[in-house]
Image (cartoon, rainbow, N blue to C red):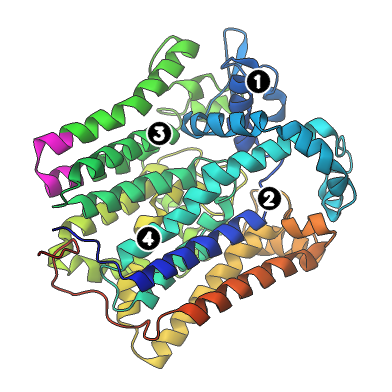
Amino acid sequence: MYKNLVPASDRRAEWFIFLLLLVCYTYFLPRWADWNVNSRMDLVLAVVDQHTLAIDSYFENTGDYAKFQGHYYSDKAPGTSFLGIPVYWVFKTLGGRAIVESIGTRFANSAFVSTLNANGRGLVMDSLYYFAALTFVTFFISAVPAALLGVVLYRFALHWANTSSIAMLVALAYGLATPAFAYANNLYGHQLSAFFLFTAFYLTYRGTGSPRAVWYALAVGLLLGAALVTEYPNALIVAAVGLYAIYKWRDAKLIALTCAAGLPPVLLMMAYNYAIFATPLPVGYLYSALYTDLHHTGLISLTYPKLDTLYQLTFGPERGLFLIAPYLVFACIGLYWFARERAWRAEFFVTLWASIAFWLFNGSSAMWQGGFAVGPRYLLPMLPFLALPFVFVLNRARTVWARVGIALVLWLSALCVWTLTLGGQMFPQYQAFPLFAYSLPLLARGVILRNVGMLFNLAGLASLLPLVVLVALLCGLYWRTRPPHPSTRIAARNSQPALRESH
């Protein structure tokens, strides 16, 4: 009989990881005036409120739009908006506008108002309704999947970690000390993609040999199909996970079910494109009204990997991933020890491919900077794959000096990511070393990202006090209820790739 052997104590840890990440993510409100976010939300509003795919009534709030035959459309992959449509319909049906009108005075009399553009329209009801709807949609479409991804990463890391504490550290480091934090509560497609792709990878692993393999196959197919229509470059990792499933399962029925489950999202995307552009192909960027020179460079901005761009994505002063989250250098070192785990060679190759393929792909783009951004945001879908091998470094950090060194680098990573995220109402622009040139000066002036504390008339750094209290309460509750021996060895180095028990 197949039996889930993740210990009951780890269920408590999973809830702690999920709630801690969710609180940290949702405490900071979505970006209000962000082209990328608005483009996706505009499609949601157009479908629900006006029953059309055209964003003619909304496009002026974004520059990320396509113009075709006299109408305006979002030029983004539609997956994020597809998922947002039913969520916004619920918000509207439950009386979202009436609720916003009833609480509008709280916003008007709070520190929230001081964050608005002095030359803007102010806190008008239509804008407040849009922001409330965006916040509601973003919570379910971005923040919840991002927090769940931390749990999935924890469960995967358990299979290799010497202790459950190490697996937890892998998950929390990824969730709070990489650019994933900056995008977890924003309506981009990157974090949602990371959830789809990495969860499909984990479920493929877990489904091997299970009597519930049919359900695993259906779930993996649906997740991979959803990933394809959420961000088109995800095809690189979708292909790797698909081949991994074929290798692990070696069952024609399961592979067929996986393919069948992945078809509905893809067919929906094709129907969407055909209804707009008279072709099932994803050609939205070819009709983008702005940055046409970049969109028409090579194949929709893609040419070939350039050494300078590859450097900029990793150690460059503007977007360098390892400058923003230096602990990920340890994760790269962990790939060496991952490769030496012969029983897990297939998992290693998926991890390696996801990391390198996305790096080379984005190193081929004329738009590698990603506009205003915290780090190389186009690399976000591969980050959980890159973060996973960190477990092998932590397993070998047995001396005091090694642990202190890793702890310092982790704190530095978290400090960089949080500062870049919280400093200002917009993401860093095109400065070299944006931590010092953009974010820190804004924080020094008390200009901090809109957050829940501001609704209680707390301004500047003082607005973070409720978050500190909430995090302390969660940590205290978990510490008091954790099992007496949380560092018990939970992974057998030579075990089979799935935890099983036969009776």
- Of callouts 4 and 2, the N-terminal one: 2
Residue for badge 2: 29
Characterize the magenta stretch by its predominant secondary structure: helix
C-alpha separation, residue under disc 2 versus residue under disc 1 = 24 Å
- The residue range painted magenta reads 243-255
- Of callouts 3 and 1, the N-terminal one: 1
Q: Are marks 3 and 1 in contact (CB under 8 Å)?
A: no
Q: Residue at x 26, y 70 (%)?
A: 160
Q: Are marks 1 and 4 in contact (CB under 8 Å)?
A: no
Q: Residue at x 28, y 55 (%)?
A: 351
C-alpha separation, residue under disc 3 versus residue under disc 2 = 27 Å
- The magenta stretch spans residue 250: yes
Residue for badge 1: 49
User: Which one is closest to the eye, mark 1 or mark 4?
Assistant: 1
Task: Give residue 232's mark.
Answer: 3
- The magenta stretch spans residue 373: no
Q: Nearer the viewer, residue 438 or 407?
A: 407
Task: Give residue 153's mark.
Answer: 4
Q: Label 1, secondary structure: give it.
A: helix
In the image, taking residue 250 as reference, residue 119 lies left or right, namely: right
Quadrant position of the N terminus in the picture:
bottom left
- What's the amino acid at mark 4? Leu
Q: Label 2, secondary structure: give it.
A: loop
Q: Nearer the viewer, residue 444 or 246?
A: 246
Q: Position of residue 158 (x, y in %)?
A: 30, 68
